[in-house]
Image (tube, rainbow, N blue to C red):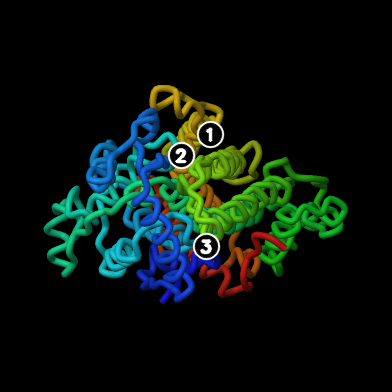
């Protein structure tokens, strides 16, 4: 069980809960923090002074005082009125991550929510109740109001959940799980939706997948270098030691270990070629820079998953309710846009390597990697697909955080668009998986033509894993199923696992 206290959650914990269905509970400290914070809100509710979100309306309605007898209705209405999401539903792992992150934020004791409401959120999580949360509708400031409202609706017995791939009413889902809807007290609706947990949840899942993607990129590049009879000279550790970026150092080590003991590379050590093209020679510099971006994202996410992002914040030492802007998603928006660029660059350089494999003027391999050029087209059109995905990424990589549009009658006049950036990063990552799958497909075909020479220890493991799902292309067949098979090999981590079983863990950082 993962125990929440609001301070010590790790990204690995988030992944365990989101994808591994690890159960979640509250620490004694977390329970006390929640209870103490609620006592302060209960005291404020008894007073007649206006406090934002507790005894006033929201956004542009913050100047409207709400009487005691209407404050519970105010919180319920907040959830109902803010559930404006549209589009496809977020995947289960993202929703589970968001539920956990919201509970952890509330456990810090700065939100004034009732303990029973947090326990309800965790009970839904542990019983695998997955609210149906539309992906679109958040501008990433005042929190992820729309999507989080859809999450909270199910707590109230409203909205919909996804059960065995089908939409079921929130009330029916709770009944089937043995849970009863909650009635929100003062401040609770605001406490549940005023946060960055959707963009952060997407970010956490993208982070985990990007770790594996960066490793896959090194594997694909090493396969390509083998097929193109590239040199290991550019991976001399002394080169990176005089420009010691952490990602570059890690990539250099990976490339050397992947290609160690390669009979292919050894066969042309003394050839006349002085240096390779940039897409081969500069793998440590390009892949390494993307790994450094991933590390920066990890640092930001680690802070955010243990942050209080509510407004107003209830200060336990003084009993004050202080309005601020911790709900603003700018920290997440910027690193997600940074990661978008880092991922897109992995795709850019991969496509260029694929192009070299297919161009016989550059590769010294059969044209388009077919033994029957002219009669067969070989893998010619796979590069078209890679180029299409690369160009699509160039559109998606435009920084979402560069945009802002006023909301709530200009009360909320600068927003982050962080949730859009996070969703775009996930889409780019998926495109890059396909781009790398195409490179792996082409590189494996190229290595086949160099038989009986064998590739290195790591590249041999990768080549074998690919050939277990995709046979050598003897004559033309549909490449689409082959691309998908290697995509699946990448997505389920099999390719990286097989390589790491052969040579040890591939590095992302020092």
Residue 143 in view, yes or no: yes
Please state the horizontal and vertical placement of residue 172, each as a whole percent of the image.
12, 58
Residue at the spot of label 1: 397
Q: CA distance from mark 1 to mark 3?
A: 24 Å
Q: Residue at x 42, y 64 (%)?
A: 34
Q: Is residue 429 above or below residue 401?
A: below
Q: Circle 1 — which element? A: loop
Residue 358 in view, yes or no: no
- Where does the C terminus fall, quadrant-wise? bottom right
- Which circle, 2 or 3, is nearer the viewer? 3
Q: Is residue 9 above or below residue 491?
A: below
Q: CA distance from mark 2 to mark 1?
A: 8 Å
Residue 424's disc is 2
Tell whether label 3 touches label 2 (CB within 8 Å): no
Label 1 vs 3, first from the N-terminus = 3
Q: Is residue 384 left or right of residue 71?
A: right
């Amino acid at each position: 069980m993962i125990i929440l206290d609001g301070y010590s959650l790790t990204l690995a914990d988030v992944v365990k809960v989101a994808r591994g269905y690890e159960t979640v509970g509250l620490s004694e400290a977390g329970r006390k923090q929640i209870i103490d914070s609620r006592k302060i809100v209960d005291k404020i509710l008894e007073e007649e002074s206006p406090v934002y979100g507790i005894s006033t309306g929201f956004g542009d309605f913050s100047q409207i005082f709400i009487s005691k007898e209407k404050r519970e209705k105010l919180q319920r209405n907040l959830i109902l009125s803010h559930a404006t999401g549209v589009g496809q539903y977020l995947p289960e792992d993202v929703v589970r991550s968001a539920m956990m992150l919201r509970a952890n934020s509330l456990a810090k004791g700065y939100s004034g929510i009732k303990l029973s409401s947090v326990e309800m959120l965790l009970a839904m999580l542990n019983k695998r109740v997955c609210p149906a949360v539309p992906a679109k509708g958040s501008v990433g400031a005042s929190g992820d109001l729309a999507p989080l409202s859809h999450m909270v609706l199910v707590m109230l017995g409203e909205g919909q959940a996804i059960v065995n791939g089908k939409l079921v009413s929130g009330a029916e889902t709770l009944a089937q799980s043995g849970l009863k809807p909650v009635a929100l007290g003062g401040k609770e609706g605001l406490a549940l939706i005023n946060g960055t947990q959707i963009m952060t949840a997407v970010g956490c899942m993208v982070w985990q997948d990007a770790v594996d993607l960066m490793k896959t990129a090194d594997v694909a590049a090493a396969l390509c270098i083998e097929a193109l009879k590239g040199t290991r000279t550019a991976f001399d550790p002394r080169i990176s030691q005089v420009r010691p970026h952490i990602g570059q150092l890690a990539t250099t080590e990976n490339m050397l270990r992947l290609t160690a003991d390669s009979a292919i590379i050894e066969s042309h050590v003394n050839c006349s070629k002085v240096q390779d093209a940039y897409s081969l020679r500069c793998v440590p510099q390009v892949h390494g820079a993307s790994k450094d971006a991933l590390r920066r994202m990890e640092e930001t996410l680690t802070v955010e998953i243990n942050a209080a992002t509510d407004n107003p914040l209830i200060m336990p030492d003084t009993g004050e309710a202080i309005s601020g802007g911790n709900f603003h998603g700018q920290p997440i928006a910027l690193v997600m846009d940074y990661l978008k660029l880092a991922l897109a660059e992995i795709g850019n350089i991969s496509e260029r390597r694929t192009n070299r494999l297919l161009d016989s003027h550059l590769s010294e391999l059969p044209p388009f990697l077919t033994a029957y050029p002219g009669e067969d087209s070989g893998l010619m059109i796979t590069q078209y697909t890679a180029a299409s995905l690369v160009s699509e990424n160039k559109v998606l990589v435009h920084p979402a955080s560069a945009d802002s549009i006023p909301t709530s009658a200009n009360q909320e006049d600068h927003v982050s668009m962080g949730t859009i950036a996070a969703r775009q990063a996930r889409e780019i990552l998926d495109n890059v998986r396909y781009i790398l799958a195409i490179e792996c497909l082409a590189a494996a075909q190229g290595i086949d033509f160099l038989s009986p020479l064998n590739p290195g220890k790591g590249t041999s493991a990768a080549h074998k894993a690919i050939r277990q799902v995709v046979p050598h292309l003897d004559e033309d067949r549909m490449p689409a199923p082959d691309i998908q098979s290697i995509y699946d090999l990448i997505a389920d981590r099999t390719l990286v696992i097989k390589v790491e079983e052969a040579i040890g863990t591939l590095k992302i950082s020092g």
